[in-house]
Image (cartoon, helix red, strand yellow):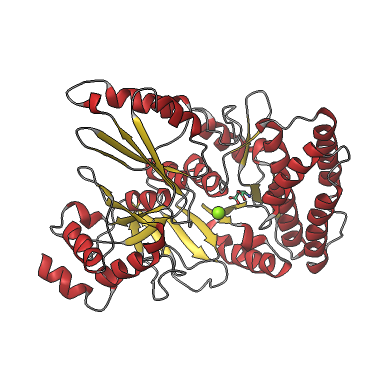
Amino acid sequence: MIVMKFGGTSVGSADSIRRTVRIVKAGLPRKPLVVVSALSGVTDMLLAAAEDALKRSLPAGDLVKKIRDRHTAVLLGLGLGPGLVDAEFAELEHVLFGVSLVRELTLRTSDYVASFGERMSSTIVAAFAKASGLNLQAFNACELGMLTNAAFGSAEILPETYASIAGAVGRIPGGVVPVVTGFIGKTAEGEVTTLGRGGSDYTASIFGAALGAEEIQIWTDVDGVMTADPRIVPDARTVAVVSFEEASELAYFGAKVLHPKTIIPAMEKEIPVRVLNTFNPAGKGTLIVRKAVKSNPVTAITSKKDIFVINIHSARMLMVYGFLNNVFRIFNDFKVPVDMVATSEVNVTVTVDKQFDVSGIVARLGEFSEVDVLSDRASISIVGEGIRSTAGVGGRIFSILGSRGINVEMTSQSYGDVNESIIVMAGRLNEAVQALHAVFFGDDAGKVAAAGA
Ligand code: ASP
Ligand code: MG
């Protein structure tokens, strides 16, 4: 069997859903289990409606109406009855009314509100497929054993989740193709959770691992993993094969193609992941496997603009043990993940995603060190299996950026890494990525690689 996951744009309009169902139909011989995201933009709208309900005494009428109109348009476009998701809307309105009454919006309630997006999209996709003569049936992942802990907003699966999914899916009658809600799960107590934004990819790989799928397909709106962000580098190309390790580095350091956690279950069970384009189904996409053999040491370049660079300086660090421990314990206390780290005798520099509020961390660090927070920097990650074994990659990075007068302010590559990350001024980011792309993927890249080897 295979898992086929379709993202928000793949189910975002009547036309997209038609494409999606056509792709599922073509995949029927491989016995698919389908996972879907909410219609594109709907999760944002649901969360905004919840925020709105918190502020107003009446339920968030306008936003709910917008969400409803969106679904109605899709339903009508598919020739389905507009009342198909009425029950979900009634329930949603109840929840939002509750929020406006109690004036409290916990992460638990946000997750519950967000879950309606996938609940409705799965219902619509299954109903349309059924009307087209295919035996698809919608399932809430919660009914299919998708158990998580109670970390609302970014829940994690439990040790027994794979077995509970395998058991529940095993009970679905043969011939039925399940269309499962991505993104959501439930606790042992039955409360709805979400896996974090973009988490439907993760759902797909969890189901793939639980069911021993032969392949996990991620159907999206781009041709696969690209050598660089095509908005920055217009001649960026699709990468045919990447390793699990490269894919997770790329996902963590800004490539938006996959949710970073997607790779973990696939890697555990060595299930290939294929990223494919719903809007160009004939394309080969990108295959993610354990080992990818390539001639170019660099596979792709990714970047991230929304970061804080936090520099922690303390003369007391010199010759003292426990300093790093103290620093990282603070990040741990605030549950803020650190992306890049570089240290010297008296400095520790880290990068953190801007979605996190670092003010509390900075205050605590300030008790024993001088702290600077820089918010106008960007990170660039040069990713490739060949980086660990090829001499001169770092040299080429520094020399091209140096020749452009772009200062590399921090670099990090640990032993055996497939990723060399650097920090530059955000204002020079595009120029830096373009220059690096030309060096590693331009017409002369082969020659330079040969000369460096
Ligand atoms: N609908 C969810 C989100 O927008 C999950 C997903 O699309 O993967 O974050
Ligand atoms: Mg996504």
Q: Is residue 382 above or below residue 356?
A: below
The quadrant holding residue 339 is top left
State the image coordinates of residue 86 (x, y, percent, origin top left): 86, 49
- Residue plotted at (80% across, 62% down): 75
Q: Residue furthest bottom?
A: 443
State the image coordinates of residue 248 (x, y, percent, origin top left): 38, 48
Nearest the camera: 265 or 27?
Answer: 265
Residue 138 appears anywhere in the view: no
Nearest the camera: 55 or 242?
Answer: 55
- Residue plotted at (45% across, 59% down): 274
Left or right: 286, with 32 as reference point: left
Total number of numbered discs in the rendering:
0
Residue 97 appears anywhere in the view: yes
**Quadrant where the C terminus is found in the figure:** bottom left
- Residue plotted at (19% across, 64% down): 399
Left or right: 27, with 45 as reference point: left
The quadrant holding residue 447 is bottom left
Q: Is residue 397 above or below residue 213?
A: below
Left or right: 382, with 68 as reference point: left
State the image coordinates of residue 173 (x, y, percent, origin top left): 67, 45
- Residue plotted at (81% across, 45% down): 88
The quadrant holding residue 139 is top right
